[in-house]
Amino acid sequence: MSEAPKTDHCYDGIEEFDNPLPAWWTAIFVLSILFAPLYWVYYQTGVEGRSAIEQYEQASAENTRLQFAEIGELTPDAPTILRFTQQDNWLSVGKSVFKSHCVSCHGADGQGQVGPNLTDEHFKNINQIQDIATVVANGAGNGAMPKWSDRLNVNEIVLVSAYVATLRGKNIEGGRVPEGREIAPWPEPPAEEEAVEPEAETAEPEETKA
Ligand code: HEC
């Protein structure tokens, strides 16, 4: 048996060797204690751009910029918004903006909650399709509808506006009662360069009106 010294306690005949902790183990232990405050100071004291969340946001903004390089910087006007109502791949980007920022007030399908129903034919602040982008950018109702221009990139505003424009007329069941006045239909989207198929109707024909 080992010659190492023993601690002087003994429980039910069980004794314990008094071996020192290995030096490497103690070193890691001490270093981790010294490292902790440095780590904390670096990441947690609120210096801009260092927290995991901010790094994630920077990376995802960078990714969005890369994606958007394809379409360039959009102008939030009627022809642009109408054009994107016809492009499913970009509409899905608009939809994901809507899912992350708008559903809490406008409902999962735009049927309205705190905010108005976006699936009927009635609007409070919208007369023309480009007004959607203006309301999204600047807010409305004295801030009841928040301003998004400092949180969303202009392309995101255009794409979410295009998505919102496609919600019109879906009349999702159980939605909020119509508010505001009935407005004229959106203009016809600009003709697609390649698409030679007949013009798609604005509302999906298979959707039953509530
Ligand atoms: C904090 C709740 C809230 C959030 C989040 C919100 N909205 Fe709104 N929104 C409102 C309210 C309330 C109104 C009505 C303002 C008024 O009374 O004039 C409104 C109005 C609108 C309108 C005009 C509707 C009309 O009838 O005039 C549009 C379009 C709209 N929101 C789109 C969006 C989009 C897109 C987003 C996400 C980027 C969003 N909203 C996020 C609360 C919200």
Image (cartoon, rainbow, N blue to C red):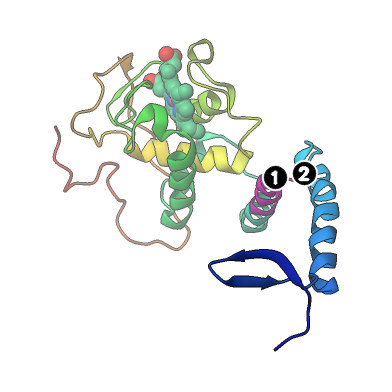
Circle 2: residue type = Gly
User: Relative to residue 92, is residue 46 drawn left or right?
Assistant: right
Circle 1: residue type = Glu
User: Relative to residue 86, is residue 149 drawn left or right?
Assistant: right
Q: Position of residue 97 (x, y in %)?
A: 49, 42
For label 2, the crowd category at 10 Å Cα-Cα, with few meaning under 14, some 14 to 19 and many 20 or more, is: few
Q: Position of residue 156 (x, y in %)?
A: 56, 42
User: Toward the viewer: 198 or 7?
Assistant: 7
Residue 96 visible from this viewpoint:
yes
Q: How many marks?
A: 2
Give the residue displayed 55% in from the left and 37% down from the top.
157
Q: Tell me the magenta residue range.
A: 50-60
Residue 207 lies in the magenta stretch: no
**Label 2 – label 1 distance at C-alpha:** 5 Å
Q: Which residue is mark 2?
A: 49
Q: Which mark is residue 97?
A: none
User: Toward the viewer: 168 or 23?
Assistant: 23
Q: Which mark is residue 54?
A: 1
Q: Secondary structure at mark 2?
A: loop
